[in-house]
Image (cartoon, rainbow, N blue to C red):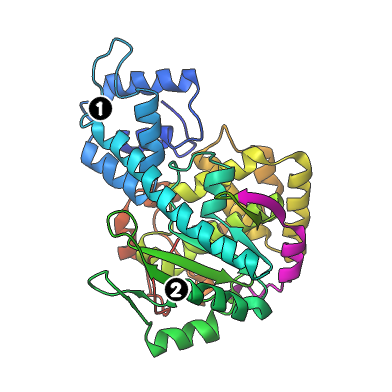
């Protein structure tokens, strides 16, 4: 069941990637059933579940397995143990995301009433407008992009809704402020974003609701100047959770995804949290590319050239192609290929250092012990749970 360009993989990881796709054709379904019939008894199902959770793919995998009844052979023979786990996770994800949708719709209505000029990035937009399934993609926070000059108005809106800058205490019953060191570091060094605003949620489904603000798509260490008004002017009107809102222009969404994948994969901050390499983030980019028109891709080329971020575009596209060679055009990937690709095996450059991984991307992708290889630690204090 060769589905990637990563070479030989463990059965558990091969199955995970085969199921981590936007849709499964009849042919793909037959391949998966044949694979399970041949190797199901050899699979370490604990490892499979662990990796599906680590890569934040279990709800989508649960949908495919339960809805398409891939847990059974064509003759009705069970192929997957504990089949109820997958349907229960998918249904739990639907219920959880609905609770979050109800809350974040309240935030959007309040922002609209206050006439704040904003757009919404990432998870909520991807889930509703690209995955087209409220349960398939797990979300946590709502990420609001706006001009820095409008930030005080956003603060008024969210504090009026009961949000506070901080995080859950140990009991999960209240929001406690970040310490002074964390607040100062983020204010001085992470000038493109704010610390999250939080509100205690329903502990059974959502521990806390989170609102994040961002004023630039580019973190300060990238040394890229952009204009928030430009992204806001290009933004697209949508309905999100039944409320009028705006999202990034499709080309800007692809640009944003590429920047984020490259940063996350190489920053100590994300490597330490184990969120540097997530199959979900690569699949997000696949969804965006599948929906992109030729005009959108032309816009993407122009945006990459304008912001001189071809290295990030290639880094993200080539690794996404390795995972999904049949869904990402290799010709598009090659357009962004730089003369020197040695940086693909490096990390820490955005932290001020430059280190080389001892193992390949494929070897690191499913090994949580990759953090043991990291040569330094992040200096960024504060939350590690966002995104």
Q: Where residue 33 sits: x, y (%)?
A: 35, 20
Residue beneath label 2, please? 163
How many C-alpha atoms fall within 10 Å of the one at disc 2: few (<14), some, or many (≥20)? many
Viewer can see residue 225: yes
Residue 72 position (above or below residue 48): above
Q: Residue at x 55, y 60 (%)?
A: 260
Asked whether residue 359 is drawn in magenta, I would say no
Q: Residue at x 58, y 55 (%)?
A: 257
**Is tag 2's residue or tag 1's residue first in the polypeptide sequence?**
1
Q: Where residue 194 sits: x, y (%)?
A: 52, 76
Quarter residue 223 falls in = bottom right
Residue 380 position (above or below residue 74): below
Q: Residue at x 64, y 59 (%)?
A: 311
Q: Nearer the viewer, residue 57 or 196?
A: 196
Q: Nearer the viewer, residue 18 or 383?
A: 383
Asked whether, in this view, residue 310 is left or right of residue 193, the answer is right
Residue beneath label 1, please? 80
Asked whether, in this view, residue 244 is left or right of residue 173, the answer is right
- What range of the chain is rendered magenta? 221-239
Say which element carries label 1.
loop
Residue placed furthest toward the top? 75
Residue 155 position (above or below residue 318): below
């Amino acid at each position: 069941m060769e589905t990637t360009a990563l070479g030989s993989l463990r059965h558990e990881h091969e199955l995970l990637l085969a199921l981590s796709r936007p849709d499964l054709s009849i042919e793909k379904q037959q391949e998966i059933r044949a694979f399970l019939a041949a190797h199901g008894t050899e699979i370490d199902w604990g490892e499979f579940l662990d990796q599906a959770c680590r890569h934040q793919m279990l709800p989508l995998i649960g949908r495919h397995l339960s809805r398409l009844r891939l847990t059974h052979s064509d003759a009705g023979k069970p192929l997957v143990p504990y089949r109820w786990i997958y349907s229960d996770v998918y249904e739990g994800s639907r219920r959880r995301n609905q609770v979050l949708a109800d809350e974040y719709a309240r935030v959007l209505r309040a922002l609209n009433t206050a006439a704040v000029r904003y757009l919404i990035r990432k998870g909520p937009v991807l889930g509703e407008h690209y995955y087209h399934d409220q349960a398939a993609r797990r979300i946590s926070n709502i990420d609001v992009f706006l001009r820095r000059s409008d930030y005080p108005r956003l603060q008024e809106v969210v504090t009026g809704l009961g949000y506070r800058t901080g995080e859950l205490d140990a009991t999960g019953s209240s929001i406690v402020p970040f310490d002074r060191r964390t607040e100062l570091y983020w204010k001085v060094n992470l000038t493109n974003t704010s610390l999250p605003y939080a509100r205690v949620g329903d502990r059974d489904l959502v521990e806390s609701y989170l609102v994040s603000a961002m004023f630039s798509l580019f973190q300060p260490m990238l040394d890229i100047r952009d204009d928030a008004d430009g992204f806001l002017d290009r933004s697209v009107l949508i309905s999100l959770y039944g409320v009028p809102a705006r999202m990034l222009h499709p080309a800007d969404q692809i640009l944003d995804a590429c920047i984020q994948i490259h940063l996350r994969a190489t920053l100590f901050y994300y490597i330490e949290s184990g969120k540097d390499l997530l199959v979900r983030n690569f699949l997000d980019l696949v969804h965006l590319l599948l929906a992109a028109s030729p005009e959108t891709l032309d816009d993407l080329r122009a945006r990459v050239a304008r912001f001189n971020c071809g290295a990030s575009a290639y880094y993200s596209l080539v690794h996404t192609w390795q995972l999904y060679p049949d869904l990402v055009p290799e010709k598009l990937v090659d357009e962004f290929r730089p003369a020197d690709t040695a940086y693909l095996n490096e990390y820490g450059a955005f932290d001020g250092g430059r280190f080389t991984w001892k193992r390949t991307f494929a070897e690191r992708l499913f090994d949580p012990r990759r953090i043991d290889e990291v040569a330094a630690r992040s200096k960024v204090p504060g939350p590690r749970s966002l995104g």
